[in-house]
Image: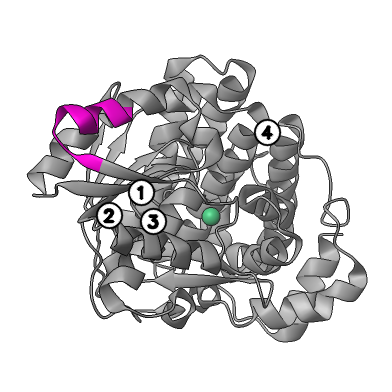
Amino acid sequence: MLGESDHSLRKFVAPEFVFGAGASRLAGRYARNFGVHRVLLVSDPGVASCPWFDDICRSLDDAGISWAPFSGVSENPRSAEVMRGAEIYEAEECGGIVAVGGGSPMDCAKGIGIVSSNNQNILSFEGVDKVRMPGPPLICIPTTAGSAADVSQFAIINDEVQKRKIAIISKALVPDISLLDPLPLTTLPPEVTVNCGMDVLSHAIEAYVSNASSPVTDLHARKAIDLIVRSLPGAVERPDDIDARFATMMASLHAGLAFSNASLGAVHALAHALGGYLDLSHGLANALLLESVVAFNYAAAPDRYGEIGRIMQAPAGGGKKALVSRIRAFRSSLGIAGTIADAGCERSDIPSLAARAIADPCLATNPKDITLEDIGRIYEAAF
Ligand SMILES: [Fe+2]
Protein backbone atom coordinates (compact mmCIF):
# COMPACT_ATOMS: atom_id res chain seq x y z
CA MET A 1 0.00 0.00 0.00
CA LEU A 2 1.15 3.48 -0.84
CA GLY A 3 1.41 5.95 1.97
CA GLU A 4 3.37 8.96 3.16
CA SER A 5 6.42 6.72 3.47
CA ASP A 6 6.28 5.65 -0.16
CA HIS A 7 9.09 7.27 -2.12
CA SER A 8 8.08 6.21 -5.62
CA LEU A 9 8.54 8.91 -8.25
CA ARG A 10 5.27 10.65 -9.05
CA LYS A 11 4.29 13.79 -10.91
CA PHE A 12 1.24 15.99 -10.58
CA VAL A 13 -0.19 17.98 -13.47
CA ALA A 14 -2.98 20.52 -13.12
CA PRO A 15 -4.17 23.43 -15.24
CA GLU A 16 -4.64 26.94 -13.98
CA PHE A 17 -8.21 27.23 -12.72
CA VAL A 18 -10.34 30.04 -11.38
CA PHE A 19 -13.31 29.11 -9.22
CA GLY A 20 -16.21 31.02 -7.70
CA ALA A 21 -19.39 32.84 -8.63
CA GLY A 22 -19.01 34.61 -11.98
CA ALA A 23 -15.86 32.72 -13.09
CA SER A 24 -17.49 31.80 -16.41
CA ARG A 25 -17.74 35.46 -17.36
CA LEU A 26 -13.94 35.66 -17.47
CA ALA A 27 -13.86 33.68 -20.74
CA GLY A 28 -13.31 36.72 -22.92
CA ARG A 29 -10.53 38.14 -20.77
CA TYR A 30 -8.60 34.87 -20.77
CA ALA A 31 -9.07 34.33 -24.52
CA ARG A 32 -7.60 37.79 -25.06
CA ASN A 33 -4.71 37.00 -22.69
CA PHE A 34 -3.87 34.02 -24.91
CA GLY A 35 -3.59 36.38 -27.88
CA VAL A 36 -6.52 34.75 -29.62
CA HIS A 37 -8.86 36.76 -31.86
CA ARG A 38 -11.38 34.14 -32.92
CA VAL A 39 -12.47 30.98 -31.06
CA LEU A 40 -14.56 27.92 -31.73
CA LEU A 41 -17.27 27.93 -29.06
CA VAL A 42 -18.03 24.25 -28.41
CA SER A 43 -21.20 23.38 -26.51
CA ASP A 44 -24.28 21.20 -26.97
CA PRO A 45 -27.89 22.14 -27.79
CA GLY A 46 -29.00 21.98 -24.13
CA VAL A 47 -26.20 24.24 -22.91
CA ALA A 48 -26.60 26.75 -25.75
CA SER A 49 -30.22 27.37 -24.73
CA CYS A 50 -29.46 28.17 -21.06
CA PRO A 51 -29.71 31.79 -19.88
CA TRP A 52 -26.15 31.98 -18.48
CA PHE A 53 -24.74 30.86 -21.84
CA ASP A 54 -25.51 34.34 -23.23
CA ASP A 55 -23.33 35.88 -20.50
CA ILE A 56 -20.37 33.77 -21.64
CA CYS A 57 -20.94 34.83 -25.28
CA ARG A 58 -21.16 38.43 -24.11
CA SER A 59 -17.86 38.18 -22.25
CA LEU A 60 -16.22 37.12 -25.52
CA ASP A 61 -17.92 39.97 -27.41
CA ASP A 62 -16.90 42.51 -24.76
CA ALA A 63 -13.26 41.39 -25.01
CA GLY A 64 -13.32 41.76 -28.80
CA ILE A 65 -13.12 38.00 -29.40
CA SER A 66 -15.19 36.75 -32.33
CA TRP A 67 -16.52 33.22 -32.14
CA ALA A 68 -17.89 30.47 -34.34
CA PRO A 69 -20.47 28.24 -32.63
CA PHE A 70 -20.29 24.46 -32.71
CA SER A 71 -22.97 22.62 -30.76
CA GLY A 72 -23.11 19.39 -32.75
CA VAL A 73 -22.02 17.24 -29.79
CA SER A 74 -24.06 14.31 -28.49
CA GLU A 75 -23.98 12.85 -24.98
CA ASN A 76 -21.19 10.41 -25.75
CA PRO A 77 -19.17 12.48 -28.24
CA ARG A 78 -18.63 10.57 -31.45
CA SER A 79 -15.46 10.55 -33.51
CA ALA A 80 -17.36 11.99 -36.50
CA GLU A 81 -18.46 14.94 -34.35
CA VAL A 82 -14.86 15.66 -33.39
CA MET A 83 -13.78 15.51 -37.03
CA ARG A 84 -16.68 17.77 -38.06
CA GLY A 85 -15.73 20.26 -35.32
CA ALA A 86 -12.11 20.25 -36.53
CA GLU A 87 -13.30 21.03 -40.09
CA ILE A 88 -15.29 23.99 -38.80
CA TYR A 89 -12.33 25.12 -36.67
CA GLU A 90 -10.17 25.22 -39.81
CA ALA A 91 -12.82 26.73 -42.09
CA GLU A 92 -13.60 29.47 -39.56
CA GLU A 93 -9.88 30.20 -39.05
CA CYS A 94 -10.10 29.93 -35.27
CA GLY A 95 -7.06 30.36 -33.05
CA GLY A 96 -8.41 28.81 -29.85
CA ILE A 97 -11.31 26.89 -28.34
CA VAL A 98 -13.79 27.70 -25.58
CA ALA A 99 -15.67 24.61 -24.38
CA VAL A 100 -18.86 25.09 -22.37
CA GLY A 101 -20.72 22.07 -21.05
CA GLY A 102 -20.33 18.71 -19.37
CA GLY A 103 -17.76 16.09 -20.22
CA SER A 104 -19.07 15.60 -23.73
CA PRO A 105 -18.49 19.10 -25.15
CA MET A 106 -15.20 19.38 -23.24
CA ASP A 107 -13.90 16.02 -24.49
CA CYS A 108 -15.06 16.88 -28.01
CA ALA A 109 -13.26 20.24 -27.76
CA LYS A 110 -10.05 18.54 -26.60
CA GLY A 111 -10.37 16.18 -29.56
CA ILE A 112 -10.92 19.05 -32.00
CA GLY A 113 -7.79 20.75 -30.67
CA ILE A 114 -5.43 17.81 -31.14
CA VAL A 115 -6.95 16.82 -34.51
CA SER A 116 -6.36 20.37 -35.74
CA SER A 117 -2.76 20.57 -34.57
CA ASN A 118 -1.73 17.03 -35.60
CA ASN A 119 -3.86 16.59 -38.71
CA GLN A 120 -4.75 13.02 -37.74
CA ASN A 121 -7.99 11.14 -37.19
CA ILE A 122 -9.13 11.34 -33.57
CA LEU A 123 -9.21 7.54 -33.19
CA SER A 124 -5.47 7.35 -33.92
CA PHE A 125 -4.68 8.94 -30.52
CA GLU A 126 -6.11 6.07 -28.44
CA GLY A 127 -3.97 5.14 -25.42
CA VAL A 128 -1.38 6.89 -23.29
CA ASP A 129 0.89 9.69 -24.62
CA LYS A 130 0.02 9.32 -28.32
CA VAL A 131 -0.39 13.05 -28.96
CA ARG A 132 2.69 14.66 -30.55
CA MET A 133 1.63 18.30 -30.94
CA PRO A 134 -0.40 20.13 -28.28
CA GLY A 135 -3.65 21.70 -29.40
CA PRO A 136 -4.45 25.43 -29.59
CA PRO A 137 -5.35 27.37 -26.39
CA LEU A 138 -8.31 25.71 -24.68
CA ILE A 139 -10.57 27.36 -22.10
CA CYS A 140 -12.99 24.99 -20.36
CA ILE A 141 -16.15 26.05 -18.55
CA PRO A 142 -17.72 22.96 -16.95
CA THR A 143 -21.49 23.07 -16.48
CA THR A 144 -21.80 19.78 -14.62
CA ALA A 145 -20.02 18.50 -11.51
CA GLY A 146 -18.77 15.17 -12.78
CA SER A 147 -16.40 14.56 -15.65
CA ALA A 148 -13.61 16.90 -14.50
CA ALA A 149 -12.58 17.01 -18.15
CA ASP A 150 -11.77 20.63 -17.33
CA VAL A 151 -8.73 19.58 -15.28
CA SER A 152 -7.92 16.10 -16.54
CA GLN A 153 -5.45 14.62 -19.01
CA PHE A 154 -8.26 12.45 -20.40
CA ALA A 155 -10.65 12.58 -23.34
CA ILE A 156 -13.17 9.82 -23.96
CA ILE A 157 -14.46 9.56 -27.51
CA ASN A 158 -17.05 7.17 -28.89
CA ASP A 159 -15.95 5.07 -31.84
CA GLU A 160 -19.47 4.84 -33.24
CA VAL A 161 -18.52 2.26 -35.87
CA GLN A 162 -17.01 -0.22 -33.37
CA LYS A 163 -19.52 0.89 -30.70
CA ARG A 164 -16.79 1.37 -28.14
CA LYS A 165 -15.34 4.28 -26.26
CA ILE A 166 -11.68 5.05 -26.64
CA ALA A 167 -9.64 6.70 -23.89
CA ILE A 168 -7.01 9.25 -24.92
CA ILE A 169 -4.63 10.12 -22.07
CA SER A 170 -2.05 12.85 -22.61
CA LYS A 171 -0.71 15.96 -20.95
CA ALA A 172 -1.61 17.71 -24.23
CA LEU A 173 -5.28 17.35 -23.21
CA VAL A 174 -5.00 19.43 -20.02
CA PRO A 175 -6.84 22.72 -20.72
CA ASP A 176 -4.94 25.99 -20.53
CA ILE A 177 -7.44 27.36 -18.06
CA SER A 178 -10.67 26.22 -16.44
CA LEU A 179 -13.33 28.60 -15.20
CA LEU A 180 -15.35 26.90 -12.46
CA ASP A 181 -18.62 28.70 -11.83
CA PRO A 182 -21.38 27.14 -9.69
CA LEU A 183 -24.16 29.14 -11.38
CA PRO A 184 -24.54 26.94 -14.52
CA LEU A 185 -24.97 23.90 -12.24
CA THR A 186 -28.27 25.28 -10.91
CA THR A 187 -30.02 24.51 -14.21
CA LEU A 188 -28.96 20.83 -14.23
CA PRO A 189 -31.84 18.33 -14.06
CA PRO A 190 -31.77 15.96 -11.03
CA GLU A 191 -30.97 12.88 -13.09
CA VAL A 192 -27.90 14.52 -14.63
CA THR A 193 -26.83 15.81 -11.21
CA VAL A 194 -26.99 12.27 -9.79
CA ASN A 195 -25.24 10.57 -12.70
CA CYS A 196 -22.44 13.15 -12.68
CA GLY A 197 -22.13 12.85 -8.89
CA MET A 198 -21.71 9.09 -9.17
CA ASP A 199 -18.97 9.74 -11.73
CA VAL A 200 -17.22 11.96 -9.14
CA LEU A 201 -17.47 9.22 -6.51
CA SER A 202 -16.12 6.66 -8.98
CA HIS A 203 -13.20 8.93 -9.92
CA ALA A 204 -12.28 9.49 -6.30
CA ILE A 205 -12.54 5.84 -5.27
CA GLU A 206 -10.61 4.60 -8.31
CA ALA A 207 -7.87 7.20 -7.88
CA TYR A 208 -7.54 6.38 -4.17
CA VAL A 209 -7.03 2.65 -4.78
CA SER A 210 -5.06 3.12 -8.01
CA ASN A 211 -1.60 1.62 -8.05
CA ALA A 212 -0.36 5.00 -9.36
CA SER A 213 -1.74 6.99 -6.42
CA SER A 214 0.51 9.32 -4.44
CA PRO A 215 0.27 11.26 -1.17
CA VAL A 216 -0.87 14.26 -3.25
CA THR A 217 -3.60 12.47 -5.20
CA ASP A 218 -4.69 10.76 -1.96
CA LEU A 219 -5.43 14.14 -0.36
CA HIS A 220 -7.65 15.15 -3.25
CA ALA A 221 -9.34 11.75 -3.50
CA ARG A 222 -10.25 11.62 0.20
CA LYS A 223 -11.59 15.16 0.12
CA ALA A 224 -13.64 14.41 -3.01
CA ILE A 225 -15.29 11.34 -1.44
CA ASP A 226 -16.21 13.28 1.69
CA LEU A 227 -17.55 16.29 -0.23
CA ILE A 228 -19.61 14.40 -2.80
CA VAL A 229 -21.26 12.13 -0.25
CA ARG A 230 -22.19 15.11 1.91
CA SER A 231 -23.31 17.49 -0.84
CA LEU A 232 -24.90 15.45 -3.61
CA PRO A 233 -28.23 14.70 -1.87
CA GLY A 234 -28.73 18.44 -1.17
CA ALA A 235 -27.87 19.40 -4.74
CA VAL A 236 -30.46 16.93 -6.00
CA GLU A 237 -33.17 18.03 -3.55
CA ARG A 238 -32.54 21.76 -3.95
CA PRO A 239 -31.25 22.44 -7.48
CA ASP A 240 -30.94 26.19 -6.78
CA ASP A 241 -28.88 25.72 -3.60
CA ILE A 242 -25.68 27.44 -4.71
CA ASP A 243 -23.77 26.22 -1.64
CA ALA A 244 -24.60 22.58 -2.38
CA ARG A 245 -23.79 23.12 -6.05
CA PHE A 246 -20.48 24.75 -5.18
CA ALA A 247 -19.62 21.80 -2.93
CA THR A 248 -20.34 19.29 -5.73
CA MET A 249 -18.21 21.40 -8.06
CA MET A 250 -15.32 21.30 -5.59
CA ALA A 251 -15.80 17.56 -5.15
CA SER A 252 -15.56 17.15 -8.92
CA LEU A 253 -12.43 19.32 -8.99
CA HIS A 254 -10.71 17.33 -6.22
CA ALA A 255 -11.67 14.03 -7.81
CA GLY A 256 -10.42 15.30 -11.17
CA LEU A 257 -7.05 16.36 -9.76
CA ALA A 258 -6.76 12.92 -8.15
CA PHE A 259 -7.72 10.73 -11.10
CA SER A 260 -6.02 12.83 -13.76
CA ASN A 261 -2.74 12.04 -12.01
CA ALA A 262 -3.39 8.62 -10.40
CA SER A 263 -5.56 7.37 -13.29
CA LEU A 264 -8.58 5.12 -12.84
CA GLY A 265 -9.37 1.42 -12.80
CA ALA A 266 -11.80 -1.32 -13.67
CA VAL A 267 -14.98 0.67 -12.99
CA HIS A 268 -14.14 3.06 -15.80
CA ALA A 269 -12.75 0.37 -18.12
CA LEU A 270 -15.94 -1.67 -17.82
CA ALA A 271 -18.15 1.43 -17.93
CA HIS A 272 -16.49 2.70 -21.12
CA ALA A 273 -17.27 -0.63 -22.80
CA LEU A 274 -20.84 -0.75 -21.45
CA GLY A 275 -21.59 2.92 -22.10
CA GLY A 276 -20.16 2.83 -25.60
CA TYR A 277 -22.19 -0.26 -26.45
CA LEU A 278 -25.53 0.89 -25.05
CA ASP A 279 -24.99 4.66 -25.45
CA LEU A 280 -25.56 5.02 -21.69
CA SER A 281 -24.83 8.04 -19.52
CA HIS A 282 -21.22 7.65 -18.36
CA GLY A 283 -22.03 8.34 -14.70
CA LEU A 284 -24.89 5.85 -14.73
CA ALA A 285 -22.67 3.15 -16.24
CA ASN A 286 -20.12 3.75 -13.45
CA ALA A 287 -22.81 3.70 -10.77
CA LEU A 288 -24.11 0.34 -11.97
CA LEU A 289 -20.63 -1.24 -11.91
CA LEU A 290 -19.00 0.39 -8.88
CA GLU A 291 -20.16 -2.12 -6.24
CA SER A 292 -19.17 -5.18 -8.28
CA VAL A 293 -15.70 -3.77 -8.94
CA VAL A 294 -15.22 -2.79 -5.27
CA ALA A 295 -16.18 -6.33 -4.27
CA PHE A 296 -13.69 -7.78 -6.78
CA ASN A 297 -10.83 -5.42 -5.84
CA TYR A 298 -11.32 -5.16 -2.07
CA ALA A 299 -8.87 -7.83 -0.97
CA ALA A 300 -6.08 -6.21 -3.03
CA ALA A 301 -6.30 -2.93 -1.08
CA PRO A 302 -8.21 -3.57 2.16
CA ASP A 303 -6.72 -0.61 4.05
CA ARG A 304 -7.58 1.80 1.27
CA TYR A 305 -11.12 0.50 0.89
CA GLY A 306 -11.44 0.52 4.67
CA GLU A 307 -10.58 4.21 4.68
CA ILE A 308 -13.15 4.86 1.94
CA GLY A 309 -15.73 3.06 4.10
CA ARG A 310 -14.79 5.24 7.06
CA ILE A 311 -15.16 8.45 5.00
CA MET A 312 -18.51 7.25 3.62
CA GLN A 313 -19.62 6.34 7.15
CA ALA A 314 -20.12 2.66 6.44
CA PRO A 315 -20.54 0.65 9.68
CA ALA A 316 -17.13 0.42 11.39
CA GLY A 317 -15.34 -2.91 11.04
CA GLY A 318 -17.82 -4.09 8.40
CA GLY A 319 -15.17 -4.55 5.72
CA LYS A 320 -16.10 -5.27 2.14
CA LYS A 321 -19.74 -6.06 2.79
CA ALA A 322 -20.35 -2.82 4.66
CA LEU A 323 -18.72 -0.67 1.98
CA VAL A 324 -20.57 -2.36 -0.88
CA SER A 325 -23.88 -1.94 1.00
CA ARG A 326 -23.10 1.70 1.76
CA ILE A 327 -22.40 2.46 -1.92
CA ARG A 328 -25.58 0.66 -2.96
CA ALA A 329 -27.65 2.54 -0.37
CA PHE A 330 -26.13 5.85 -1.47
CA ARG A 331 -26.93 5.43 -5.14
CA SER A 332 -30.39 3.97 -4.39
CA SER A 333 -31.22 6.95 -2.19
CA LEU A 334 -30.47 9.15 -5.20
CA GLY A 335 -32.75 7.19 -7.52
CA ILE A 336 -30.32 4.77 -9.19
CA ALA A 337 -31.82 1.51 -8.02
CA GLY A 338 -31.41 -0.69 -11.10
CA THR A 339 -28.82 -3.04 -12.55
CA ILE A 340 -27.03 -3.25 -15.87
CA ALA A 341 -29.89 -5.51 -17.04
CA ASP A 342 -32.33 -2.65 -16.40
CA ALA A 343 -30.06 -0.44 -18.53
CA GLY A 344 -30.54 -2.80 -21.47
CA CYS A 345 -27.57 -5.15 -21.12
CA GLU A 346 -28.12 -8.83 -22.03
CA ARG A 347 -26.05 -11.69 -20.63
CA SER A 348 -25.14 -12.62 -24.20
CA ASP A 349 -23.43 -9.19 -24.52
CA ILE A 350 -20.86 -10.02 -21.83
CA PRO A 351 -18.17 -11.69 -23.99
CA SER A 352 -17.97 -8.78 -26.42
CA LEU A 353 -18.14 -6.20 -23.61
CA ALA A 354 -15.31 -7.99 -21.78
CA ALA A 355 -13.22 -8.08 -24.95
CA ARG A 356 -13.63 -4.30 -25.29
CA ALA A 357 -12.96 -3.59 -21.60
CA ILE A 358 -9.74 -5.61 -21.42
CA ALA A 359 -8.15 -3.22 -23.97
CA ASP A 360 -9.00 -0.08 -21.95
CA PRO A 361 -5.93 1.80 -20.63
CA CYS A 362 -7.71 2.48 -17.31
CA LEU A 363 -7.10 -1.17 -16.34
CA ALA A 364 -3.36 -0.55 -16.09
CA THR A 365 -3.78 1.10 -12.68
CA ASN A 366 -6.47 -1.17 -11.22
CA PRO A 367 -5.17 -2.35 -7.82
CA LYS A 368 -5.75 -5.99 -8.71
CA ASP A 369 -4.65 -7.81 -11.85
CA ILE A 370 -7.64 -8.67 -13.93
CA THR A 371 -8.28 -11.26 -16.65
CA LEU A 372 -10.89 -11.49 -19.37
CA GLU A 373 -12.71 -14.08 -17.26
CA ASP A 374 -12.65 -11.78 -14.20
CA ILE A 375 -14.22 -9.01 -16.26
CA GLY A 376 -16.98 -11.34 -17.40
CA ARG A 377 -17.64 -12.28 -13.77
CA ILE A 378 -17.80 -8.62 -12.70
CA TYR A 379 -20.36 -7.84 -15.41
CA GLU A 380 -22.26 -10.96 -14.32
CA ALA A 381 -22.26 -9.75 -10.70
CA ALA A 382 -23.71 -6.41 -11.80
CA PHE A 383 -26.82 -8.04 -13.31
FE1 LIG B 1 -15.61 9.26 -15.32
Give the amino acid at mark 2: Pro
Q: Amino acid at mark 3?
A: Ala
| Residue underneath mark 1 | 150
Residue at mark 4 to residue at mark 1: CA–CA distance: 21 Å
Q: Residue 271, located in which quarter of the rendered image?
A: bottom right
User: Considering the numbered disc 3 on the image, is that residue within a helix, a strand or a loop?
Assistant: helix
Q: Secondary structure at mark 1?
A: loop
Toward which corner of the image does residue 276 lie, by quadrant? bottom right
| The magenta segment | 56-66
**Disc on the earlier residue, 1 or 2:** 1
Membership of 143 in magenta stretch: no
Which amino acid type is shown beneath numbered disc 1? Answer: Asp
Separation (CA) of disc 3 from disc 4:
24 Å
CB contact under 8 Å: marks 1 and 2: yes
In this picture the colour scheme is one colour
Residue tagged 3: 109
> Residue 175 bears which disc, if any?
2
Please state which of residues 368 and 262 is positioned toward the viewer in this rendering: 262
- Decide which of 170, 30 is in the foreground and name it: 30
Q: Residues within 10 Å of mark 4 (few under 14, many from 20)?
A: some
Residue carrying label 4: 191
Q: Nearer the viewer, mark 3 or mark 4?
A: 3
The structure residue drawn at horizontal position 77% and vertical position 69%, both measured from the top left corner, is: 378
The secondary structure that most of the magenta stretch takes on is helix
Q: Quadrant of the N terminus?
A: bottom left
The answer to whether residue 107 is visible is yes
CA–CA distance in space, label 1 to label 3 = 11 Å
Can you give x and y, in whole percent of width and height, for residue 55 in the image?
Answer: 32, 23
Q: Is residue 64 magenta?
A: yes
Write the residue at 25% across / 48% down.
Answer: 39
**Label 4 near ligand 1 (CB < 8 Å):** no
